[in-house]
Amino acid sequence: MAIIERPGTETTPAVVTPQQTLGAVKRPVETKGWREWLFTVDHKKIGIMYGVVAMAFFIVGGVEALLIRLQLAAPNGHILSADKYNQMFTMHATTMIFLFAMPMAGAFANYFLPLQIGARDVAFPRINALSLWLLVVGGIVLNASWFLGGAADGGWFMYAPNSGPVFSPSHGVDFWVLGLQVAGIASLLGSINLIVTVLNMRAPGMSLMKMPVFTWMILVVQFLLVFSLPVITVALVLLMLQRSYGATFFDVSQGADPLLWQHLFWIFGHPEVYVLILPSFGIISEVLPTFSRKPLFGYPFVVFSGASIGLVGFGVWAHHMFASGLGPVSVAVFSIATMAIAIPTGVKIFNWLLTMWGGKLWYTTAMKFAIGLVILFTIGGLSGVTHSVAPSDTQQTDTYYIVAHFHYVLFGGMVFGLFSGFYYWWPKVFGKMLNEKLGSWNFWLMVIGMNMTFGPMHILGLQGQPRRMYIWTKARGGEGLFNFGFWNMVASIGSFILAIGVLFFLINVVKTARSGKTAPLDPWDARTLEWLTTSPPKPHNFDRIPVVHHLDEFFHRKYEEDSAANTMRKIADGEELVRAEEAAADANIHLPAPSYWPIVLATGVGILGLGIIYGVPIMVVGFAVVLFASFGWVLEPSVAEDIDFAPASNDGNTKEIAPLG
Amino acid sequence: MDTVSHVKNSRRRIVATLAGVAGTIALAGCAQNAPQDTFVPKGDNAQKIDTLQKVVFPIAGLVGVLVVALAIYIFIKFRDKGQDIPAQSHGKPTVEIILTIVPALILTVVGVFTFRTIMDLAKTTDTQMVINVTGQQWWWEYDYPAQTDQGITQPIITSGQLVIPVGTNVLLRETSRDVIHSYWIPALNGKKDAVPGRIHLLRLQADKPGIYAGQCTEFCGLSHANMRMEAIALSKEDFAKWVAGQQKGYTSPDEGTKAKEGETVFINQCSRCHQVNGIKDANGKAIISAPDENVYAGAAPNLSHLMSRTTFAGAMFDLVNQKCRDDVWKAKSDEFGAKYLTGVTTDCLNQKNLRAWLRNAPAMKPMYSDPTKLAKTGGKYRGMPNLGLSEDDIDKVVAYLSTLK
Amino acid sequence: MAETATHTADHSTEHGHETSTGLTNNKLAMWLFLGSECLLFGGLISTYMLYRGRVSSGPHPSRIFDIPFTSVSSFVLLMSSLTMVLAVSSAQRGDDRRTNLWLTVTALLGATFIGGQVYEFTTFIREGLGFSTSLFGSSFYTLTGFHGVHVSVGVIMLLSTMGIIRKGKITGNKAEVVELIGLYWHFVDIVWIIIFTLVYLIPS
């Protein structure tokens, strides 16, 4: 790994030989090739790996979705058996939520959060790596079930008592429970890590209200996770104890109350919805101002509405349970509380529109996806308002109208936001521009495909097609040209157009990697600190920790107000600013060392989990690995001793950074 | 002044047109006569929901059209035409406050109406008739307690099709024998979950005679998609006839007929789980089925008056052929009662599906009847197993079942 | 979670860098972790409160709880909080010998509590309250067992820390490590006070 590349100065990478044996084995020395990735603690590498893992699972979840649409294209479909279909929709949701959406948001958060706040890494680099590897282990455990007797088949909501040992006798639910617990630990550690990073490691001068909105939204999300994950963990533990050790928590014959699961699940599950959408809100709150050449309209309102969405999000879980037999008073309270959430959400949409109002709109692919989010999320949000009306919801819940609603919110909202982020930040991460022409194809096919797939579902749902059914019948499908057959076919065709749209993105990625044009340092005339460094950023992010004076610090370093002409005058360009930082670089930046332990510990946790399914001996092995890794971890200093660093060269201005620590 | 109001008017007209166009597209795109349409109320409770929906959906639609129109206006008007970089204004708190208060006001109004409807739909004081509804994998059982004012002098147990008198406030007391199910007849009311160990109440009332389709809407395992039901509303007189039919005693088929042989097969093969009220064995002893010994949920459909229903196997299959089905489903409401009460005649019987069902039930409807998968239930089935009947036996059983009018 | 408390090795990449909040990263992380743990125990306690009266078979809580015995073991656990405070203050004074002494005493008291819990569990099982006997049984063992696991993890952390301090291999600020374990330990004690009150003292 080259350290600092500066024209004219030839620097040999510092050769590092650890002087002492740390813990049980030596600290990793080699950081070339695959080891560079496996043992890294660099938030940027971890971020990229999060992205790769999430994208892989996006494809897995997407294939599952296509199979579902194939099955439902015509009445009495026979592509999938009832059993396989139930596994398919369970795993589609689980994969998309826990293995694509959250990790992909994690990819952005990991990569850009330290950059946006002017930090050199996250607070706990090794825990960061541990989170990634636990997620990978969780994902593998979840999907291993496909090959070990069938996947979970109880729906991603896994309602008791259907998820109990009697009604779901295969190991699918066991894998699901364990996979999610492991992924849950990953998220919890990740969220604590990111909160500490944001609260403690901001560059001098960056007060909370000068933080980029993306960082803000990620912060809100991490708080949601810290306080909602333990609740789902309780639910999962109860279910695991029942399935594997004979506990009685959801055994109705013993007097159990099945609604306990629903409450625990949705106390987590509803904040989870905001966990999914807020990162995308954050992304487009960066993209829209950049391509409108205006600051975000009403920054404090966007921030506080995000925070209040998060807060109120904890008090509305029972709107998933309007049909479950709560008393009318609870239903009324949760109904009204749910409507209240529409207000801060509306505030956000208006602020995005007003950000563009009076701007100078530049329609790049990133901007198109951001605009797509605004429109599609509005549609999804409004159908959400119709759900908050509890009596109406008792007609529409568990029909395709709900499926339409949350896909507009999650696909039209969340996924479009993430794609906006891909196009916006790709040059930053990889130093190359994604192809805008292919991007345009990517965008339009996704818009058309998305609306064709999920638009008709509004009609299907309102006309009474329930969800989670492996077949639908002509008898309940109505008559006329626009019967259920027509709309289901449209939706299925749409899903393939959508898939082709996503394929264009993958083609774009490959093409860019092979022959994409090198990105300028500041291709979008951007506004925030992550652009105040090279693309891709150096291992230590910033040559000098920036001192922040403004919201949109980078923009304000480039532009000066021209109050006479009521416009902005350019005083510097991004390239010059980055060179200036390089010239004033800090000396002797010590970066955290790579470590074996995160991946070893994660593997141990995975083995421990499998032990719960396959018996005590495996559990003992897992426990031993966990213990071994824990002690190795504790005994290993994260930053190497000074003696391990190559001595600074005599040139007083030169800095040597040992990539190994 | 005039021009201002003119502009306002024309703007209003544009908005109205846009909303109208969107509405027309949405309506024109709908299927006709979809049996589970949520916007076609046929009774009081559904009507209350519909009244609310017909306010909320247009408001949501209108807001949507306005926002999208504004967005499109912005996209065109403020595109990059080479203008200067705009002043870096950070927003106007007044605008923010207005944009917070306006939606809040709209939602307050919606909230008030929602609250009233919720309370209305939870009322139980005006109940005129009670029916116990029990869900299990994957069919519904209805149990009518004796209610002399409704002419029900002894309890009635039936399944698949819920029969109610029109203009009567019926209260369903829902529960489940295994997992959570949800009872939903869109034309009559929203859905309500049937949860094991709990009793949930759902009001139903139908204005006119007719057949109203429904579907279990809480995912309940393997054959969730096949757990359907119908509500049958009959005029008060027809309902009394139906009750009388259900309370009619059992008549064993005549000796020497195929049906009589079928009764023997039924007693040997089916009566362990399926009750037929009044059936007696060769010694004249009443046969009481014991589904709890064979089926995990502890119940199997009571077949006493099977041929008075038009569906079987959790309303998954029609017991009548397509022609007779259309006859019932498409009957005008004043003719409906008579047609439904005719029951399943020999001409109408859907021989194909009934035979296939008797031949190998799990092949027709996914169920847990593979003995290797029943370890957790102590060998008890979830659903009906393959009984291995011979074609001859099937003939006989069909002949017998046809007599259960 | 043993790692979290002793993760002192992970800190901001610059030595001595002032944090924005003034709290060290480790301490802030520990507070967040404990905040999350509150919800975890909140969920388990709610489950127990919902189910404690549901005894379909086996003994009823009032029949098997031995309040005097549990009071004593609760007192032992409370005392361990006191010794933990003494350990932290010794560590802050840099007095290794006393730090070690008080950590040992804390670990012993914790182990005594665990011993009491094991004894209690075996007694209950002998009296017919199995893990699968009733909802009360399942939720009682799960709640108190989870707490017991937390205490055990604490004991392991205490012993490990002592070992590491003795071998001089501690990474990061010694006093802070002890303080973090102290935070965790006090949290676990407070949770026990709540559990003891709700489970044992308030009759169902």
Image (tube, rainbow, N blue to C red):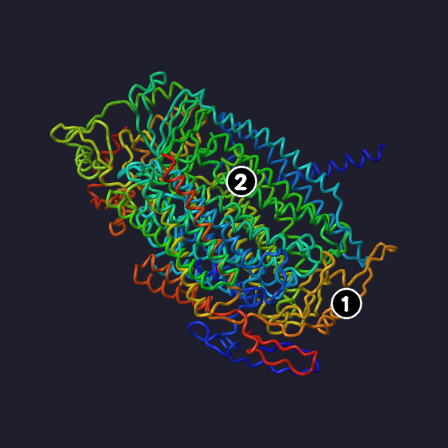
CA separation, marks 2 and 1?
A: 47 Å
Residue for point 34% across, 19% down: B147
Amino acid type at mark 2: Val
- Within 10 Å of the Cα at label 2, are there few (<14), some (14-19), or many (20+) other Cα atoms? many
Q: Quadrant of residue B142?
A: top left
Question: Where does residue B272 sit, x and y in percent of width and height?
Answer: 21, 37
- Name the quadrant of the C terminus of chain B: top left
Q: Viewer-proximal residue, A468 or B6?
A: A468
Question: Where does residue B308 sit, x and y in percent of width and height?
Answer: 32, 29
Q: Secondary structure at mark 1?
A: loop
Question: The residue marked by circle 2 belongs to what chain?
Answer: A
Q: Secondary structure at mark 2?
A: loop
Residue A316's label in the rendered image is 2
Q: Is residue B350 visible?
A: no
Amino acid type at mark 1: Asp
Q: Quadrant of residue A613?
A: bottom left
Q: Viewer-proximal residue, A182 or C84?
A: C84
Q: Earlier in the sequence, mark 2 or mark 1?
A: 2
Q: Which residue in the structure is indicated by mark 1?
A: A573
Q: Report whether C47 appears left or right of A52.
A: left
Question: The residue marked by circle 1 belongs to what chain?
Answer: A
